[in-house]
Image: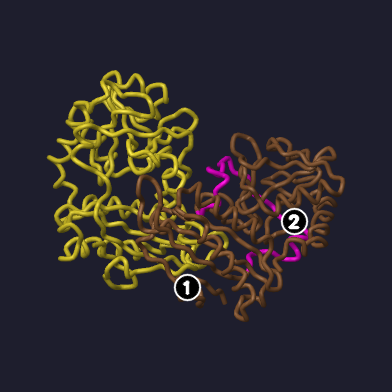
Chain colours: A brown, B yellow
Amino acid sequence: MAICFINGNFNSASQCGIPVTDLVIQRGVGVFDSVRIYDGKAFALTAHMKRLEKSARLARIDVGDGAVIEKMTEVVREGAKRPDCPDGGNCIAKAYITGGDVVEHGQFPKPRHFVIFESGGNISTDDYKNGVALQPTDEGRPCPLTKSINYLVGLIQGSGRDDIYECLYCPDGKVTETLRSSFFICRDGKIITAPVGTVLEGVTRGIIIGLARENGFNVEERCPDVSELAKADEAFLTSSWREVLPVVRVGETAIGSGKPGPVAARLRQLFKANLDKWLDA
Amino acid sequence: MAICFINGNFNSASQCGIPVTDLVIQRGVGVFDSVRIYDGKAFALTAHMKRLEKSARLARIDVGDGAVIEKMTEVVREGAKRPDCPDGGNCIAKAYITGGDVVEHGQFPKPRHFVIFESGGNISTDDYKNGVALQPTDEGRPCPLTKSINYLVGLIQGSGRDDIYECLYCPDGKVTETLRSSFFICRDGKIITAPVGTVLEGVTRGIIIGLARENGFNVEERCPDVSELAKADEAFLTSSWREVLPVVRVGETAIGSGKPGPVAARLRQLFKANLDKWLDA
């Protein structure tokens, strides 16, 4: 059962609420970040919480001198070790900062914040074994450096079909990122992924790029053209929760052989082997 | 003070909350509609509640056979006449449907709903006398027929400057709508506004187009090119709360003489004169 830290206390998440006057409910003014918890230890905690702070500043939500971020970082650490942390401390901690009730000169000076610990989402061993399919959409994700809660359009684009894992944003014929993950293709001996700024600064993305380069892979940071999907040898996505997940189809286009490829498998293996480096003490 | 109807009761809005587990908070899954209340009477209530139902369906939020919409319609009527309705019954009623806690096959089968009655926003006599300025943005509003709560990008685009009323969406060089209103220009003896589908089906927009045509104006429904702004004689926006509000500048471009024009004034006068037609009994 999900637990939540709000207003200074941990509680069952279903008992925790936000007033209807908060702009997160009324106008989607809210940012968040997701931290994976492995056996009670947070993964890449500082990097995620720095990104949360950046998202808040870009969304003009006042986080002051960063004390709020420090406090939330401590809450993630504390919650991860609680006996009631979901799934024995193998879950997702999501830290939210809402717009609060007030807007002044286009700024949100009185945010609320909470951290919810809950079971991870829809991912199975089969997804790693068989790979997943994505639904391309012409839409882009506006303000890509801000991890805001405004997911509705992306959720609608990739939904209603059980064979689709999530949408792949392809604005103006360029492949950027998926609803919740960074996206990579392998082609002509290179790993290709969109540069930060056109996409969110994925924490796992950065770790995977580093591991790939250290291990002799050639990584190119540019947005692949949609037409390159048909020519790719393989594709995969990365995120804290998904680690490295093979993609075998985008819309009607099979990727490579239509089966998970060796690069994704190798990178996930490297990620697992090095995981300790990014786990909280 | 704002009041809210939720879970079967009216209360002070600050006492009403939504659980943090609701996808409206976690992922921006929510739709709403705003109904202006004049002296305890709702304006164009049925049209707004039909649009709310449409928004919910487009967002894949289950509203069943429409009984929820009927109930919310009754709540707007009832709240509008309460002694504690804000500003003596001259306010805005906002009806929300949230995604709830559950997503199944890309649908949201267990929504929550509430209606909040609050004071209207930032509009003054000076705004009508002097007109307002808009900030153009290259972004578009995705899924334009859905009035979702995903306003963050638009709020950021037009914010931080006290001289800017709100943003004007101009994707691909085409003028569509503003953050919260329909947008019109007057040029070469015509009134021009974007067609429904590229923009939200504005209720006041439809009423104003009808009044304009009945009174001998020529109305063309197409997206003006951004370059036409500099050539326009005047511009204005429409919404329930704003009625007909003159626009005198877009970015650095003065519209016409840089002062409110006669068409907007005439249309607002016609609107006021005919208002009773759309007021609830």
The percent position of residue B11, horizontal first and vertical second, equals 27, 70
The percent position of residue B45, horizontal first and vertical second, equals 25, 53
Q: Which mark is residue B198?
A: none
The residue tagged 1 is A8
Query: Can the viewer see residue B214?
Result: no
The percent position of residue B72, horizontal first and vertical second, equals 30, 63
- Residue B84: name its quadrant: bottom left
- Residue B10: name its quadrant: bottom left
**Could you say whether the residue bearing mark 1 is in a helix, strand or loop?**
loop
The residue tagged 2 is A244
Quarter containing the N terminus of chain B: bottom left
- Residue B139 in the figure: left or right of residue A234: left
Q: Amino acid at mark 1?
A: Gly
Query: Can the viewer see residue A94?
Result: yes
State which mark lies toward you, 1 or 2: 1
Up-down relation of residue B207 to residue A76 (above or below): above
Q: Is residue A129 part of the magenta span, yes or no? A: yes
Span shown in magenta: A120-149
- Residue A111: name its quadrant: bottom left
